[in-house]
Image: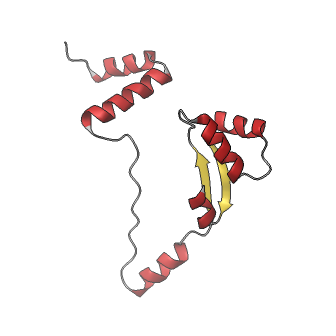
Amino acid sequence: MAKLSTDELLDAFKEMTLLELSDFVKQFEDTFDVTAAAPAAVVAAAPGAAGGEAAAAEEKTEFDVVLEAAGDKKIQVIKAVREIVSGLGLKEAKELVESAPKPVLEKGTKEAADAA
């Protein structure tokens, strides 16, 4: 097989559907034992006593939970969204899940965000 240039690969990806591209990424991750997820940012505290105070002051007290994608278990995701968002009907929960990425919980506590 001839070696493809970066531009040729990008052109091939542009021709693919999102489902085909998603399958490709999964197979690529499995083949090369890598992940396409972005690495988490690491925040270093300033040295000394001021660093401890700054870290305490920057500690988050409000959290947002965002539904990125439903995946292949959409029914379970809809049920979970209905548990998280009180007063949400089946139709509204289904619409929220299908329109992902969408915020599910905004400015919630750490406990509520962890439970979600």
Q: Residue at x 44, y 17 (%)?
A: 16
Q: How many marks do you count on the picture?
A: 0
Where residue 29 appears, as percent x and y from the top left, is 32, 35
> Could you tell whether 64 is left or right of 9 in the image?
right
> Could you tell whether 43 is left or right of 69 in the image?
left
- When the figure is inspected, residue 28 is found, relative to residue 52, above or below; the finding is above
Q: Quadrant of the N terminus?
A: top left
In terms of image quadrants, where is residue 23?
top left
- When the figure is inspected, residue 3 is found, relative to residue 28, above or below; the finding is above
Determine the residue located farthest toward the top in the rendered image: 1
Q: Residue at x 42, y 80 (%)?
A: 51
Q: Quadrant of the C terminus?
A: bottom right
Residue 54, can we see it?
A: yes
Q: Nearer the viewer, residue 105 or 90?
A: 90
Where residue 55 appears, as percent x and y from the top left, is 47, 76
Q: Residue at x 27, y 39 (%)?
A: 33
Q: Residue at x 48, y 82 (%)?
A: 53
